[in-house]
């Protein structure tokens, strides 16, 4: 069993991005600029946005964090997105999800200028991804593809089972795994809360992507010996042995499943850091594309 070490791989990719930014600036390019919108003070969202802003500083990007009270209306939030759309200095926009219940996440995401959609959630980005056209890939599935690529894992012809059908992880993951790319060319089964015989389907998987949001959901009896497991879940559970009184776990029973696997991602330190790499690569791409458009206008 080998750990797919997202911390290590992300450090390696971040070094490449950092050098790329230096080279880009040496050619007269400007610092990539990521603007993040955070509504309310959900501790998990605070932590995720904090990691993203910190990564910007590490990589030589500029970042702006806009915080809003949860009482902000949908129209007001969309107006803030529009300000960022019109701000020439901003290359990438991310809206940290989830948003408060009275705001439609879809409406806010749809308001982002697709040329600044570095989380890859806009319908234009998702549509282009589906058609195999160049675009911003959703950060988490993109990060997972980068991880598989780094370890040179050939998934062509494998049966991959994705658990969870969200628009930001499960569904786009199925597209990327099945595309005619390297890595890619897998045969993919998408499963969800209404899937029957999930355990049997998982037992046939050469690779499982777990994106459910339920701690320890994938257990050893669901795993074929030699399978690869990618654990996307981030769940906080009580743990009296920790100073904080809690700890993070994935959607997979790591202790039970790891001995059976050929490769497995840990939580934390697996998919999470790779998601940030996906976001940062998209932001650098957005900055470069904007400058190309400006030069040819
Ligand atoms: P979501 O709640 O939008 O989707 C969960 C999916 O799980 C749904 O499609 C649902 O059908 C499926 N599901 C629920 N119960 C099921 C069951 N019993 N059997 C089969 N499928 C079931 O969640 P999401 O946004 O895709 O996130 C999933 C998890 O991944 C969460 O823990 C989230 O925190 C984590 N996440 C991590 C990263 C990262 O960077 N590591 C990024 C995004 C999300």
Image (cartoon, rainbow, N blue to C red):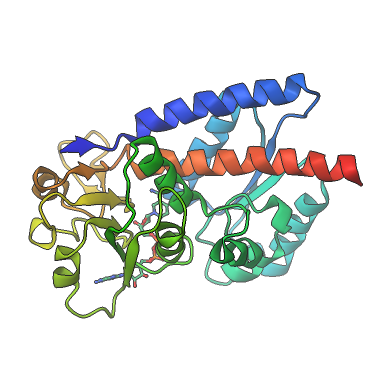
Residue 29 point in image, percent of width and height: 78, 28
Q: Is residue 1 left or right of residue 188?
A: left
**Is residue 129 shown left or right of residue 224?**
right
**Which quadrant holds the N terminus?**
top left
- Quadrant in which ligand 1 is drawn: bottom left
- Residue 262 figure quarter: top left
Does residue 150 appear in this view?
A: yes
Give left or right: position of 197 versus 122. left
Question: In the picture provided, is 254 more to the left or to the right than 12?
Answer: left
Which residue lies at the image location 88% right of the left edge and 39% below the top edge? 295
The answer to whether residue 103 is visible is no
Q: Is residue 287 above or below residue 76?
A: above
Residue furthest right in the image: 297
- 267, 221: nearer the viewer: 221
Residue drawn at x 89%, y 44% as measured from the top left: 296
Q: Could you say where residue 241 lies in the image, as x and y percent from the top left?
A: 15, 36
- In the picture shown, does residue 156 fall above or below 146? below
- Total number of numbered labels? 0
In this view of the protein, which residue sits in the foreground, 285 or 249? 285
Q: Position of residue 171 (x, y in %)?
A: 43, 66
Point out residue 6 in the picture as x, y percentages from the top left corner.
Answer: 35, 36
Q: Which quadrant of the figure has residue 258?
A: top left
Q: Name the residue nearer the viewer: 251 or 228.
A: 228
């Amino acid at each position: 069993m080998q750990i797919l070490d997202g911390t290590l791989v992300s450090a390696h990719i971040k070094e490449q991005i950092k050098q790329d930014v230096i080279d880009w600036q040496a050619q007269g390019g400007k610092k990539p600029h990521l603007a993040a919108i955070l509504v309310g003070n959900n501790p998990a969202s605070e932590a995720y946005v904090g990691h993203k802003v910190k990564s910007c500083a590490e990589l030589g990007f500029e970042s702006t964090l806009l915080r809003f009270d949860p009482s902000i209306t949908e129209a007001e939030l969309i107006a803030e997105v529009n300000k960022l759309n019109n701000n020439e200095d901003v290359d990438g926009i991310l809206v940290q999800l989830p948003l408060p219940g009275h705001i439609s996440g879809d409406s806010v995401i749809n308001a982002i200028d697709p040329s600044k959609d570095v989380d890859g959630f806009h319908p234009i980005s998702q549509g282009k991804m589906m058609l195999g056209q160049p675009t911003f890939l959703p950060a988490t599935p993109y990060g997972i593809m980068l991880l598989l690529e780094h370890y040179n894992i050939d998934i062509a012809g494998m049966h991959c089972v994705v658990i969870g059908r969200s628009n930001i992880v499960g569904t786009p993951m199925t597209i990327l795994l099945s595309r005619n790319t390297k890595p890619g060319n897998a045969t993919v089964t998408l499963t969800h809360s209404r899937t029957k015989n999930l355990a049997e389907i998982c037992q046939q998987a050469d690779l499982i992507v777990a994106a459910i949001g339920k701690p320890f959901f994938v257990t050893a009896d669901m795993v074929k010996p030699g399978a690869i497991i990618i654990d996307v879940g981030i769940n906080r559970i009580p743990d009296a042995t920790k100073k904080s009184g809690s700890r993070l776990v994935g959607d997979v029973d790591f202790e039970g499943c790891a001995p059976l696997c050929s490769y497995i991602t840990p939580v934390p330190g697996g998919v999470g850091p790779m998601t940030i790499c996906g976001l940062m690569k998209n932001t650098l791409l957005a900055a470069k594309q904007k400058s190309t458009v400006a030069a040819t206008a």
